[in-house]
Image (cartoon, grey):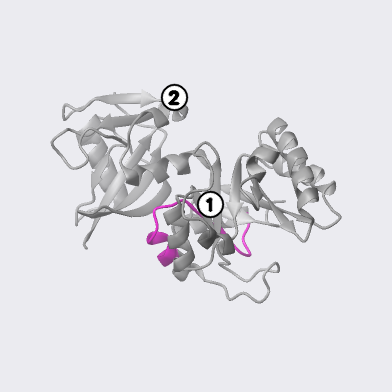
Amino acid sequence: MKVLEVAVGVVFNRAGEVLISQRPEHVHLGGLWEFPGGKVEADEDVDQALRRELLEEVGVDAASSTPLICLRHDYPERSVRLHVRIVHSFKGEAQGLEGQPVRWVPLSDLDRYPFPAANLSIIHALRLPSCYAIMNLEAGGGLHLDEKLEALAALGIQLVRLRPLGCEPADYQRHAARLVRRGERLNVQLLVSGDPTLLDQTGAAGLHLRSTQLSSFSLRPTPRDRWLAASCHDAGELARASGLGVDFVVLGPVEPTASHPGAIPLGWPRFQALVEAVALPVYALGGLDRGDLDYARRHGAHGVAAIRGFR
C-alpha cells in the first residue's frame, strides 16, 4: 500500500495551549479532531509543506519548527506517515480558513477530544520527556538509589525506570514504594518492572515490561491513566508491544554497551528502519547519553534512554 506523507504541526501559543481543528464530516475520519497539517507534495520537504498547510488551513505562518516524532499508521483504507513538528512561534491569528472549528486546548484536556488513531501517539509523545533514565536495584541495594534519584532530578530527568537485578520481590516492592514517594516530591515519575499488581502496591506512574513478558498478555495489563512501556530488540517484539497498546518502547542496543556486552548492536540505519514501521514513541538505548539526543531524533527516536548516560 502506498504511504501518504503528511506534515503535522503541533502549534503552541504563549499560554502553552495547543491548536487543534475538527475534520469536516464528509471527509476521511470526519468529525474527529486533529493537529493541523496536510500532504507533503512531490516538490516539497516537510518544513515547506508544514508552513504551506498551516497558512492555508489555519492562517498561521510558522517559519521554523522542530521535530517531535515521525510515525506510520496503517488504516484499512490507507497508510500514512506523519512527520510531526513542534511550532512555538508564528505570525498571524489562528482561524479555520476552510470553515472548520479550531480551538486552543491545554495539553491536559486533549483526552476530552476524539482523535484519529494515528494522532494518539503524538499526544503520548507530547507528554513524554526526551530522556528516560534506568536505575538498577540489585540484591542488597536500594538505599543509595535515593541519592541517585535526587541527582537525576537535579539534571531535569522526569521519567525513570526502576529495574530489578536479582533482588527479592518483597525487597523490590518495598524500595519501589519508597522511591515512588520520593520521586513525587522531586517531580519524577517512576515506572516499575514485574507483575502489573506492583502498580497498586507501589503507586508507581507506570509499568515497564521486559521483552520476554510481551507474549504473556493478550490485552493491555494497565489502565490508561498509567504509563505502559516495553523493552524491544527487533521487529517482532515491536509488533507485540504495539498490539498490547503500550504508550512507548525502548529499542536497542543501538551501539555497544557495557550493560549488554554480548549483544549485537542494531546500528542507526537498522534502528531507523524499525522505528519507521511502528506508530509509537521510541527511546533509543545502548551506549548513548543526552549528547546523542539530536542524532537519535534525526533517526526517528523520540528520545534516549540510559543507565549510566545521565550524569
**Front residue of 247 and 264:** 247
Q: Mark 2 highlights which residue?
A: 14
User: What residue appears at the point 43 percent right and 61 percent down from the top-left corner?
Assistant: 239
Is residue 187 one of those drawn in magenta?
no
User: Which residue is situated farthest in the left direction here?
Assistant: 26
Position of 287 relative to 44 (above/below) = below
Asked if residue 12 lies left or right of residue 288, the reply is: left
- The amino acid marked with disc number 2 is Arg
Please tell me in which quadrant of the rendered image residue 157 appears: top right
Task: Tell me how far mark 2 sits from mark 1, CA to CA.
Answer: 25 Å
**Compared with residue 228, is residue 61 higher up or lower down, i.e. above or below?**
above
Q: Which residue is mark 1?
A: 303
Question: Would residue 72 be found to the left or right of residue 231 on screen?
Answer: left
Where disc 1 sits, the SS reads strand
Classify mark 1: residues with Cα within 10 Å, few (<14), some (14-19) or many (20+): many
Q: Residue shown at 45%/57% (left/top)? A: 298
Please check the rendered image and state whether residue 276 is part of the magenta-colored stretch, yes or no: yes
Q: What stretch of residues is rendered in magenta?
A: 272-289
Q: Nearer the viewer, residue 220 or 55?
A: 220
Q: Amino acid at mark 1?
A: Gly
* Residue 65 appears in the figure: no
Disc 2, SS = loop
Q: Which is more toward the observer, 232 or 270? A: 232
Circles 2 and 1: CB atoms closer than 8 Å: no
